[in-house]
Image (spheres, rainbow, N blue to C red):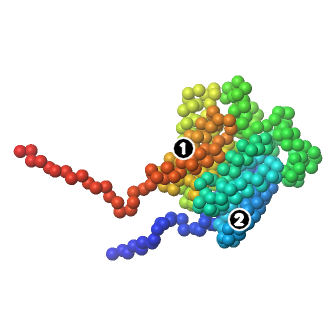
Amino acid sequence: MSKFVVGSSPHLHNKKDTGAVMRLVIYAALPGILMQIFMFGFGLVIQLGLAIVTAIVCEVVILELRKKDSERAVKDYSAVLTAVLLALSIPPLAPWWVIVIGTFFAIAIVKQLYGGLGYNMFNPAMAAYVMLLISFPVQMTSWLPPVSLSAQDFSIWDSLYTIFTGFTASGYSIAQLQVVADGATMATPLDHLKTSLSEGYIVPEALNNKSFVSSIGEGWGPVSLAYLVGGLFLVKLKVINWHIPGSMILSAMLVSGVLFMFDASTHASPWFHFINGSLIVGAFFIATDPVSASTTNKGRLVFGAAIGFWIIVIRTWGGYPDAIAFAVVIMNMAVPLIDYYTRPRTYGHTVKAKNITSQDPK
């Protein structure tokens, strides 16, 4: 007769500690980070450094003031991961104070003010991104064109100068760096499409631009696919469940597909929404935050699907071209309600069978 050993709850399949899980997520993001640096320059390296240092300093200082174990908290890498995700989300040459303010807000306000890791209601990186975008819209939308289309060459030293002074070592401003070889100012694929539609162009006309190849924005497609590789790696290792990224992407594709079939002249295809913007990195690296996301499998499906829905709604009718942060924060508020109605049946609980009284047909 075989013997079974039953351990105490919670029955976790992934036996790695929090620090190991957070490090795996960071490692999985490396392909996307490296591709993003290759496509858009070394500014991201500097933003990552500023964000990580700010996050660690804020975490240590606040925990020391609260008389908590700061060394143990720093070693869980949750603050580092928050810093990385926020740095990936902002323009690579945004002023240094943007990432410092955003990281401080993420760690000190969104995370520690609620009690620290495990108690924060909102995704810290996305809540900070929303705050920055609303507070500093110009700095947060000053994305550069891919290096391959840029009219000006800029090195890591130019990136450093620009982040801290607003100008490259050669004296070029952010506005000048945004100009591509033909003299036009470059925008992100989603921003370009929204602006073109507001000016009366239809989608095929908007995408008839040298910065697009088969609806894929120059530079943005390879970055998205690199993050997809890292995300699938996390699913394979069971660091994250497939429920949130799967339902989020499927929902976004279905909603955008319906709109595209309804009117292809004013709505982009599902492929455009999938490959451009932050849908992939949001699905695998942001929405799957174990603290602020739903905790049940059914709840994760609902949570992810609702985020995908809101992404397309905001991209289509909202004032912001990419809507990952807003969609995630909106659904973070709904997590308690989702978990309440999707919690699994208590172990050992059975539905009482109804008493059926048979009657003699005679």
Residue in view at x 57 percent, y 49 percent: 333
> What is the x, y in percent for residue 346?
39, 60
| Residue at screen point 61% across, 44% down | 327
Reading the image, the residue beneath label 2 is: 62
- Quadrant showing the N terminus: bottom left
Q: Give the residue type that dot 2 points to.
A: Ile
Name the quadrant of the C terminus: top left
Is residue 165 visible to the viewer in this orientation of the structure?
A: yes
Q: Quadrant of residue 277?
A: top right
Neighbours of disc 2 within 10 Å: few (<14), some (14-19), many (20+): some
Q: Earlier in the sequence, mark 2 or mark 1?
A: 2
Where is residue 220? Give x, y as percent: 71, 43
Residue tagged 1: 306
Three-letter amino acid code of the residue under disc 1: Ala
* Horizontal relation, residue 150 to residue 323: left or right: right
Q: Is residue 106 left or right of residue 298?
A: right
Q: CA distance from mark 2 to mark 1?
A: 34 Å
Question: Which type of secondary structure does the marked residue at label 2 adopt?
Answer: helix
Of badges 2 and 1, nearer the viewer stands 2
| Quadrant in which residue 53 is drawn | bottom right
Q: Which mark is residue 166?
A: none
Q: Is residue 151 visible?
A: no
Q: Position of residue 289 (x, y in %)?
A: 60, 55
Query: Nearest the camera: 34 or 299?
Result: 299
Q: Position of residue 32 (x, y in %)?
A: 69, 52
Q: In the rendered image of this protein, does residue 168 appear above or below residue 207?
A: below
Q: Residue at x 59, y 68 (%)?
A: 17
Q: Residues within 10 Å of mark 1 (few under 14, many from 20)?
A: many
Element at label 1? helix
